Amino acid sequence: MTFYSAGIHLIKLLRRPYLLAATLVGLVSVSLAIFVLDMNHEDTLARYQRGQALRVGYAIEEPFAMVEADGRVTGEAPEVLRHALRSLGRENVVWLQADLASLIHELESGRIDIIAAGMFVTPARAQRVLFTRPTATIQPGLLVRYGNPLHLRSLSHIAAQPTVKLAVIDGSVEQQLAHKAALSEAKIQAFPDAAAAAGAVRTGLADVFMLSFVSLHFLVTRAEAGIFELVVPDTTRDGNFAGLPAFAMRLEDKRLRDAIDNALADFLGSPAHLELMRRFGLLDDNIAVAPGISG
């Protein structure tokens, strides 16, 4: 189109306002569509660096994730994540609470961007999410009524007593361990969180609650005296299992995972990290200075 013909075309449009309006609307629509397509092609890290908040999902399990009286989300996982994000230059986060069993689904569906809940790394979960390096190494524990009247010391003991009921958190590694120990479904009672499972032991609905030793110790120290007793499982019967909690991201968010993992490499095991973990009842032996991830 020559300059002259373009000018004639513009004059015709000006004489017909409805044509001019339609042309402008079309141009705006095309520009908006291109902008939206560009936005959709950005990964989570790019959107975060551009100023969009990261949506972080967590499930209540003290001391890994909990909410203070003023509504602030805290715990081992949130505080370590905050440090990692600050090292990336910003800390723009929206915290979203969910049950442990639904967190991976929430991540896959796009409703959250990161899981910060002390979630243990397992092969099955690693098929669905990307994990960072572990932030700790955690042993399991058993919560029983005070005095341990049924003398429960291991999953083997629990399996051998037909009437004993085991409480677990739905979707937890401990639930998987119970299945591997050949406990029947009738013996396993799944609850949405630690408070509900501990309440079941207290009222007699369940006889024992299996969770991480750190979480159960945190719970016992805050309960009334003479209610609960914490038992270290007999590893000669059940084997020595150590859970490795880590942050989880969608499979396509490798850049975000790698950025957070690199930040963790400089922080985990440092004096500042050890001091932070002691606030939540974790000992130096619980700190996992693990090699970086791959893939």
Image (spheres, grey):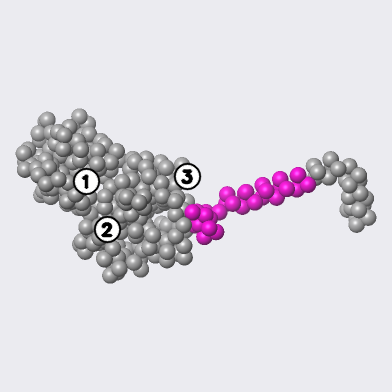
Q: Nearer the viewer, residue 133 or 28?
A: 28
Point out residue 272 in the picture as x, y percentages from the top left corner. 30, 68
The amino acid marked with disc number 3 is: Gly
Residue at the location (16% across, 37% down)? 201
Residue at the location (30% across, 40% down)? 171
Q: Quadrant of residue 76?
A: bottom left
The CA distance from mark 2 to mark 1 is 15 Å
Point out residue 48 in the picture as x, y percentages from the top left corner. 50, 57
Above or below, 138 relative to 173 = below
Residue extending farthest to the front is: 70
The amino acid marked with disc number 1 is: Leu
Q: Nearer the viewer, residue 173 or 293?
A: 173
Q: Which mark is residue 136?
A: 2
Q: Is residue 244 visible?
A: yes
Is 137 left, or right, of 155 in this rendering? right
The CA distance from mark 3 to mark 2 is 27 Å
Magenta run includes residue 28: yes
Principal SS element in the magenta part?
Answer: helix
Pointer 3: residues within 10 angstroms few (<14), some, or many (20+)? few
Point out residue 31 in the picture as x, y percentages from the top left corner. 70, 50
Reading the image, the residue beneath label 1 is: 211
Q: Which mark is residue 110?
A: 3
Magenta-highlighted residues: 24-53
Q: Is residue 178 visible?
A: no
Query: What kind of element bears circle 2?
Result: loop
The amino acid marked with disc number 2 is: Ala
